[in-house]
Image (cartoon, rainbow, N blue to C red):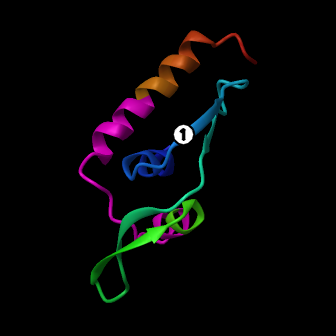
Amino acid sequence: MYLIAAFLAYGFERVDLDRANPNRQKFHFKDGKKLVFIKNLDGEVHKEYFDLDSTRQAFSNNMLLLPGSYPSILKSLKQDILTYKQNNNDYK
């Protein structure tokens, strides 16, 4: 969920949302490159064009700086996922 919010905050385009299993919703994004901000091991910040996989790796390595819109996008995403899950709790 946190990585999905990072993708959305950086403007990666969501192309599909598989909600067949409300407990395991799958987001699919259009691959492409977006300008992201990275902090290297020396603490220097620079910007690069990253694809989805490079952005995921930077996120996993705590090198991806998150835009100011990230908290509100994360909040909206959590609310959307939880609301859908609660409204479709007949899946077992």
The relative height of residue 77 versus residue 1 in the rendered view (above or below) is above
Q: Nearer the viewer, residue 63 or 10?
A: 10
10 Å neighbourhood of mark 1: few (<14), some, or many (≥20)? some
Secondary structure of residue under mark 1: strand
Count of numbered marks: 1
Q: Quadrant of residue 46?
A: bottom left
Res 78 → quadrant: top left
Q: Position of residue 6 (x, y in %)?
A: 42, 51
Horizontal arrangement in the rendering, residue 48 relative to residue 85 (left or right):
left
Q: Give x and y (percent) for residue 12.
A: 48, 49
The residue furthest right is: 92
Magenta region: 56-78
Type of secondary structure dominating the magenta stretch: helix
Vertically, is 69 above or below 66? above
Circle 1: residue type? Arg
- Specify whether 40 is left or right of 26: left
**Between residues 63 and 35, which one lies in front from this camera angle?**
35
Q: Residue at x 64, y 13 (%)?
A: 89
Give the labeled residue for mark 1.
14
Q: Which residue is drawn at the image coordinates 55% and 58% (left, top)?
A: 32
Q: Is residue 22 magenta?
A: no
